[in-house]
Amino acid sequence: MKKIMTQVSAPDLSKMEEANVVDAIRSTWISSTGSYINRFEKEFANKCSTNYCLSVCNGTVALHLALLALDVRHGDEVIVPSLTYIATANAVRYVGAEPIFIDVDPKTWCIDPDLIENSITRRTKGIIVVHLYGHPADMDRINHIAAVHGLWVIEDAAEAHFAKYKGDPVGSLGRVGTFSFYGNKIITCGEGGAITLNDKNLSIRAKTLRGQGMDPNRRYFFPVTGYNFRLTNIACAILCAQMERYKNILTKRLNIFSTYREFLSEINGISFQPVAEWAEPTPWLFCIVVNEKEYGKSRDDLIRLLENQGIETRPFFIPLHLLPPFREQSVERKDSLIHTEKISRSGLNLPTFSNLSKKEIEKICSIIRSSSLR
Ligand SMILES: Cc1ncc(COP(=O)(O)O)c(C=O)c1O
């Protein structure tokens, strides 16, 4: 294998993030109290059009906290898409519940609303939708089904900061929205996460659980067993700078997306992520899908070819129902998730980060073009 020269992602950090971190350190507020935490939570809630935002230590914890706050327990079932990162289903298991996997809609790559009702049982408590690869799920239809059956909806928006559904920001469309600020995300602080929500009582419950279960009105009195899920003031100092710069970060990534689309257009067997007419996706990682017959090479052949030229890519997520922690239950349920498996097998993410030059994109695209059957 050749040395990787172009990685798949890199954070966009500037002097502003650096200055904020120095400021947080000099203030001595380096743990989970401090002005950057309050500022970030206020700004992010504002941006998501929600009443509340609670920062937490990563996106997996955000999901876990949302499920705990919603009182999901042992024996409950939660409907989730199989085409997602494992954290979505792991969090369901952390609270003793079982993820019930359903297929995605090939028009959005997100959970297919038409298949939800068939999977609802007496044990079903809610639905976690994933706004996959920056594209929002069809929230109106999902919320309607949830309302009819008395279920809640969590939006896993780890990959979709600032995406919009019919003009409204993701994170404001379900009972709780969850976000990740891992290093490869649109905005980052290395490791971090958040939940967004409108319900005051639910936010008090989540805040209590986030801080070891301490009564918000009585210090060192713990009415419930809680967790330490807090994020630090240093991390929020980075996030505050990222929030000041997010429009600039998005513009750079949107340019990368349009350059890829331009240079990869009309290659036999190469297609892009679909975009629904009601969606305003966020430019996370650029996705392509390889049709092996038409292109003449498989997705994995193309990944190897690019790797040999020093270009790192990412295969799409392996469907969760096929992975060892979930496989047995999935076989028992006779899951048949055709679209999930097809998309997973044929898709890959190309390098997407602010400093990726047009020249590098051109090189990546010319390798992809010259390898096609023509
Ligand atoms: C869809 C999805 N959900 C949850 C997570 C978990 O976030 P984190 O890595 O911050 O724990 C990720 C992470 O990349 C993700 O892609």
Image (tube, rainbow, N blue to C red):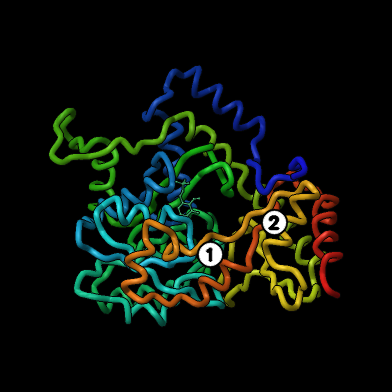
Q: Give the class, few, some or many, for how many residues have Cα within 10 Å of label 2's Cα (few <14, many ≥20).
A: many
Amino acid type at image mark 2 = Leu
* 229 lies above or below 290: above
Callout 1: SS: strand
- Residue 259 picture quarter: bottom right
- Residue 280 picture quarter: bottom right
Where is residue 367 drawn, in percent x and y?
A: 83, 59
Q: Is residue 309 visible from the viewing direction of this image?
A: yes
How far apart in space, not on screen, are marks 1 and 2 (Cα)?
23 Å
Q: Which residue is drawn at 29% across and 40% down?
A: 210
Q: Are marks 1 and 2 in contact (CB under 8 Å)?
A: no
Q: Give the class, few, some or many, for how many residues have Cα within 10 Å of label 1's Cα (few <14, many ≥20).
A: many
The quarter of the picture where the N terminus appears is top right
Labels 1 and 2: the sequence-earlier one: 1
Q: Which residue is drawn at 78% across and 50% down?
A: 308
255 sits left or right of 281 in the view: right
The residue at label 2 has a CB less than 8 Å from ligand 1: no
Label 1 sits on residue? 164
Closer-to-camera residue (173/347): 347
Where is residue 368 drawn, in percent x and y?
A: 80, 63
162 sits left or right of 101 in the view: right
Where is residue 303 drawn, in percent x and y?
A: 70, 57
121 sits left or right of 168 in the view: left
Q: Residue at x 51, y 32 (%)?
A: 237
* 28 lies above or below 140: above
Label 2 sits on residue? 350
Question: Which of the labelled discs sits on residue 228, or is there none?
Answer: none
41 sits left or right of 3 in the view: left
Where is residue 6 drawn, in percent x and y?
A: 75, 45
Amino acid type at image mark 1 = Lys
Mark toward the viewer: 1 or 2: 2
